[in-house]
Amino acid sequence: MDPILLGVADTIESEFDSEVYKTLSPLEKYHSLLFRSVDKLFGFLGTDRSKIAPYLTDFVSIEAQSLGREGYGFTVKDSNDMGFGGLACHTVDLGGASVGGAIAEAHAIVKANPYAVVLVAAADVPKSVFKQVSDLKRLTATVCHKEWEMPYGATLIGLYSLLCERMMFDTGVTSEDLEEITKHFRTLAETNPRAFQFQKPLTEKQLKKPLSGVYSTPMIAIVTDHGFATLITSEIMKQKLIENKIINKDSKHIYLAGSGHSAHAEYFIQKKDLKSPAALACEKAVASSGFQRSDIEYAWIYDCFTGMIIHEAGLYFGVSPKETTTALRKGKISNGVREIPINLGGGILNYQAAMAISGATGLIDIASQYGLAVDPIPKKLETQPNVSLLGGNGGIDSINSVILFSKEKPKPQREPLTLKPLEVNVPNPKVGEKATILTVSTIFFNPGGEKKPPYLIVCSTKENGEMVLTNLYGKNGAEILSKDGLELGKSKVEFQEIEGKIQAVLLD
């Protein structure tokens, strides 16, 4: 049985009266976003909550951790509050990969039960929480290893910039490439009335003011209040809903052709050789769909940071980062056969993205290409793509989810290709041991952090391949604050204990 998607609705803050909305508590905002998204979806399908309730079998949702709504019980409560008592409830928490993970959960449910009708819906209100310095500290504590990253001033942005610095060194991608790619997707968003960056032109001053390493503010995803809802079922149940006059008789759908997700280590320092789960997640999704990567005609690639579009697209399609970068300057990527457009709504860098459900931005983008979005993005392809890919990333490139959609029925599933397993790094540096700098980045932004910027974070590799994250010191005992003169893969350090911490001391 081939699962199908019937429509997607999302809700943004500007849909509410601003004076009323700002007086709501975070939980009231959450419920407003969630319930409105569900009602918009059902209205689009020609139904409402009371009419469709007897046919719903499952509710899949995503933890709104910024509100402390963690755990299965909150999903059950939301289901009951919407009037859907008795459903099988499922809770997903894959960070930024959660929307893909929730769709994959619904995909598996319908595959196993052709009579399932699955509501996937969630909301989050991140800026109600993370705009405060104290909550930025909480975010750092969530994503950074408390022993091997936090004491050295690691931040979410800083660790991603470490990944980008090494990628640029290995591939020849330049800061100018990142700027041109950022400009392209910002331009798309400026014409989208629902985008956060609508009618907000990008300035050179913004691009040239770094927050961490090569990343400036326009290269980092914004966070906004956001909610979404979608309905996933089978063709059998769609027909039954039409015959019973529950949904419109002319309701359209696309197939959920394939799904896959892959998890790596939770923390940056645990990623052996800085490997990513993206390639494995894509291979699982493509294999389960029966299609080939070359069949994909449109893609939405997760862009929490500009460098991640290059990184993920290259891994998804087996194309070199430099080749991917050249295509991305025109808003396209290579699927191995031809260049295909991506992220026509501007991506989460520019549209709407609520941390845990940031992938909903991509779901709206993809659904818009098939006429299945309640509020579509303005820019669409001239002809509907036969196969589309939705990619999502969570943590510090810790987990990846990939969903394939298609106009025609999926092909028979094939066995996934055997890919190299992801190894875990265990830091265990000793005083006096030597290492080589693998990647380094300058931190200019650490609100609420104990370590005041600017400073360097350095990832060094011992001869046995073990990675260690530290700051950098000179032999004179002074901390080095600039990466000028450092050579990745060449500059040597020695580990010493400084103020109770293992630190890297630069050797001549």
Image (tube, grey):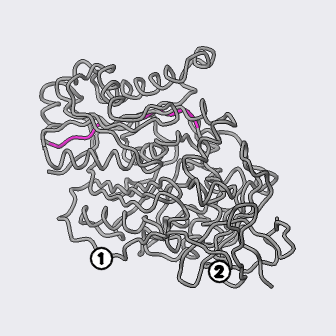
Give the left or right position of residue 334, taking residue 217 as reference: left
Q: Quadrant of the C terminus?
A: bottom right
Q: Residue 207 sits in which quadrant? A: bottom right
Report x, y in % for residue 282: 37, 64
What's under tag 1, amino acid-wise? Thr
Which residue sits at x=28%, y=47%? 105
Q: Residue 262 sits in which quadrant? A: bottom left
Report x, y in % for residue 179: 70, 61
Q: Is residue 26 above or below residue 204?
A: above
Report x, y in % for residue 297: 39, 62
Name the residue beneath numbered marker 1.
418
The secondary structure making up most of the magenta span is strand
Q: Nearer the viewer, mark 2 or mark 1?
A: 2
**What is the spatial separation of the Cα atoms under label 2 and label 1, in whole angstroms?**
36 Å
Report x, y in % for residue 337: 41, 75
Provide the residue span drawn in magenta.
224-235
Q: Residue 374 sits in which quadrant? A: top left
Which residue sits at x=75%, y=65%? 498
Q: Secondary structure at mark 2?
A: loop
Q: Residues within 10 Å of mark 2 (few under 14, many from 20)?
A: few
Name the residue beneath numbered marker 2.
433
